[in-house]
Image (cartoon, rainbow, N blue to C red):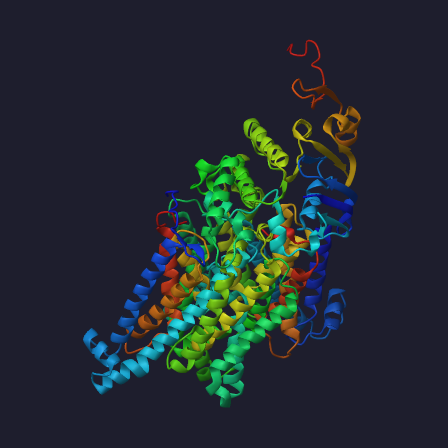
Amino acid sequence: MSDSFVTDPVVRTRFCSFRLPRRAMELNLALMAVMGGVLLCSLALGETRLAPGEVWAALTGAGEVGHGLLVNAIRLPRSCAALTAGAALGLAGALLQTLTRNRLASPEVLGVNDGGLMAVMIVVLFLPSASSALWMVSAGGAYLAFLLLMVFSRDIGAHGHRFLVIGIGLSQLLRAVNELMLSAGQLQHVTAVYVWSVGSFVGRGYAEALPVSAGVLFCLGWSWRLQRDIDLFSYGEATAAGVGVRTTSVKIQTVLLAAVSAGLGISVGGPLAFVALAAPVAYARLLGSPRLSLLGAALCGGGMTLTGDWVGRILLAPIELPAGLVCRTLGGLFLLWLLVHPKGRGR
Amino acid sequence: MRIGAVILVLLAFVLLSFGFGSGEVSPVVVLRYLFGATELPDREHVEMVLWSLRLPRILGAVLVGACFGLAGALLQTITRNRLAETDLLGINGGAALGVVAGMAYVGAATATEHMLAAFVGALGGTLAVVVVARRGGETSSPLRLILAGLAIASVFQGVLGFILLEDQNHLDRYRFWVLGSLAGVRTSQLAPALAGAVPGWVLAVATVRGCAALNLGDEIAENLGHRPGRTRLLAVLSVALLTGTAVSLSGPVVLLGLVAPYAARHVERDRMGRFLLCSALFGSGVLVVADTLCRTIVRPYEAPASVLVALVGAPLLIHIARSPRPLAALDR
Amino acid sequence: MNISVRNLEIHYGALRAVADVSLEIAPGKLTILVGPNGCGKSTLLRGISGRQALSRGEVRLEDTDVAALSARERARKVALLPQSPVTPEGVSVRTLVEIGRHPHQGFFQRWTPRDEHAVAEAMRRAEVSELADRRVETLSGGQRQRCWLAMALAQETPVLLLDEPTSMLDLGHQAEALDLARRLALAGKTVVVVLHDLIAAARYADVLVAMRDGRVVAEGAPRDVVTSDLIRELYDTDAVILSAPDDGAPIVISSKTPTPEGSDDD
């Protein structure tokens, strides 16, 4: 494990000066390339296989009508939905983990996922007429859970741990109630809800992807402004305050951004577990440094869900496996691989 | 002193618990029986209910609660992370996978078979975590343990999901098992459960000194002559045995592993041995109370244990976390 | 920059860590706070830095109340080196020192030549330049302590507060660090150092402030203040005071039990 650190090149113009995080940028570009490749595969391969040329033709509107429909109306929107969901979750996880200096911190641990699931279950099992607006319901449930968390912990300015512990208590409570409802409902409803609860992008498209990506971009932008301050939290709150970070304000903003982002993420395809937790960890290992990279975590998350969705479609075609399960299994194996083979100066 | 108080409270709960439950035997009758009243109608029935139904169940609750509480305390100590619990580290997931796979593919149907499957699953999960945490040329640092546990938990959950979706029947049976319940606990199951739990306790006791040193940091622990890597390994094995036993008896009752250590820390923060004991006692106490409530609040049905534990434990956890004590020790 | 502490009190719940302390700390002189364990010197330092809530009293920098400053302004005026800071893993020494520049960096101006110069100079002064590309967690305790000192120096503040900056340093590095603190003070900064080592404090301080049980029991130049009575009051131990041959600063020699005659016979 070498100790050498490459110095980042400095950029200075009349208006601004900064250093290019070269390694992070290279990694991000590589990730984007990989995601582009996966996207292409996801458009080309599935129950119906298309050659790359046919995909291109479909995208530009020149190919067969059937192919055009498949690519433009089904696969592309669905892939976009998967991408934005993963990006939102990865961002949320990165924000919380850096703020609390705890790799186990993620929105699902705080009850956001369980809140969303609860809202959906209530609707599906008791108010089936409202099933069409499911994505709003789930986002609403997630935010309500978060609000409850805020009410209980009262004071975010307190230690990060207190906040997390209360979140866990709340999430377990919600989870228990969810499991109770699962046992109470009729089996076919329960199965449908279970599939949703695991996370799946079947039937998702631009209707979900567009508002969510707008939200994700907004969150990314806002947290980008705060990025340096949030990163300083990894040196401890005392040190961060010592170099001039407005700790309470930054904490509140970060938690809010994480909650909004997570809620958006689960509203697309359901409460996908593991992505918010694992995307920042995987990115940190690939980069070899625990420095916060919001774009990197979002890219990792998006890549995970996109891959999960695609693999779920092709693995046992024509049966579709829910993306969430694939994410969990493959994501877990990927993390295991990263743990067992440390890359250079990774840890 | 304070531990004595906790023990007394636990005993009180246990005694109280005897008074309630199924079998149509009211608290008054129980009291009369215990005080040696001779002209009890239906004496045989009362005896049957008390000794064959309630006693094993209460003993089961004490055992399961102690196992979860102790396991949670051990995990939090060796990972130095107050959020660590068996659920996040894949041990519960392994047990669940064992049970579901057993139900689905091996045709496990009896309670003992479920027990075995859960036990094997929990051990398998733990083994995987330990193996991964030790690879890569580093000793199992807390972070590696956590990450390995996360990864394996995730893989197990994924595979579990596949099995459940494959056949609706699997989901149908799983959704009841996952709620957790002590209703089916019989005397015949207590002996094999002890066989699993006692080695776990013994291992836990063996790691007490090592764990106390771990709190000071790996470097200092080594200077004092301990071996942090070995302590962690033994502790994880203990956790596996304890959790496997507990889950096999009652299903996954997760929150106990988090609440019990938190409560215990308020009573006994300094001495590791007492902290672990306290954690086990709190686990038992919470579960006994929850189980009593399970039997009484929706008579004649049974409320599921995990919901009750969550209802009892979550407010307790939130209350503790909100207390204004300087919780500086929580932050590392 | 003058620091005025007036009637300062800091409570931790029922515990009174600092009780009614009033001090005037001037630039140009090295001020050292000493006292037995638990006397409140670290708490007082944190109170002066503005990072600790005050139960009563106020701290003023020149004429500005420290509590009224924003976090950024305060970070530009006061640098505090805490006792046991958190070190994240995977961070290089250079990166750690660089975060000391944060209060001077805006959103657009993130890495000016000024920043580079300050970091290089800070690392040179704290003697960690050759460790610049090493990871902090691989360093020894003493090396790490110097890295944090470099970070505080990189902040380039008129007020420098150091909490036990030498506890893990060997004799050579300890002398260097305290000498550096003294030179910075002489150059015009206001430097306050908390030390538990009275001997070193007596050697290097221009102004010595002795505390016990949250109160100031002595304040002044070491040669006036350091007496065997003071040492007995602070540490409950007997000592002999000598004068240093070069500048007359007091040298404290604590007494020890004389070896009895013939005790090695066995």
Q: Is residue B73 left or right of residue C54?
A: left
**Within the image, what quadrant is residue B44 found in?**
bottom right
> Visible in this render: residue A316?
no
Q: Is residue A149 above or below residue B91?
A: below
The single residue placed furthest to the front in the displayed view is A14
Number of numbered discs visible in the structure rendering? 0
- Image point 60% across, 75% down: which residue? B303
Residue at 36% across / 66% down in the picture?
A303
Q: Farthest residue toward the bottom?
A: A129
* Residue ID at (55%, 74%): A143
Pick the residue in front: C15 or C183.
C183
Q: Quadrant of the N terminus of chain A?
A: top left
Tell me: residue B164, above or below residue C154.
below
Q: Position of residue C184 (x, y in %)?
A: 60, 36
**Would residue B110 be found to the left or right of residue C71 on screen?**
left
Residue closer to the observer: C133 or B285: C133
| Residue occupying the point 65% across, 9% down | C265
The image quarter containing residue C72 is bottom right
Residue C236: x percent and y percent?
Answer: 77, 29
Q: Residue A28: percent from the left, percent from the top? A: 36, 60
Quadrant for residue B151, please give it: bottom left
Asked whether residue C124 appears in the rendered view, the answer is: yes
In terms of depth relative to the viewer, which is nearer, B76 or A151? A151
Residue A312 in the image, given as x and y percentages of width and height: 33, 72
Q: Nearer the viewer, residue A27 or B67?
A: A27
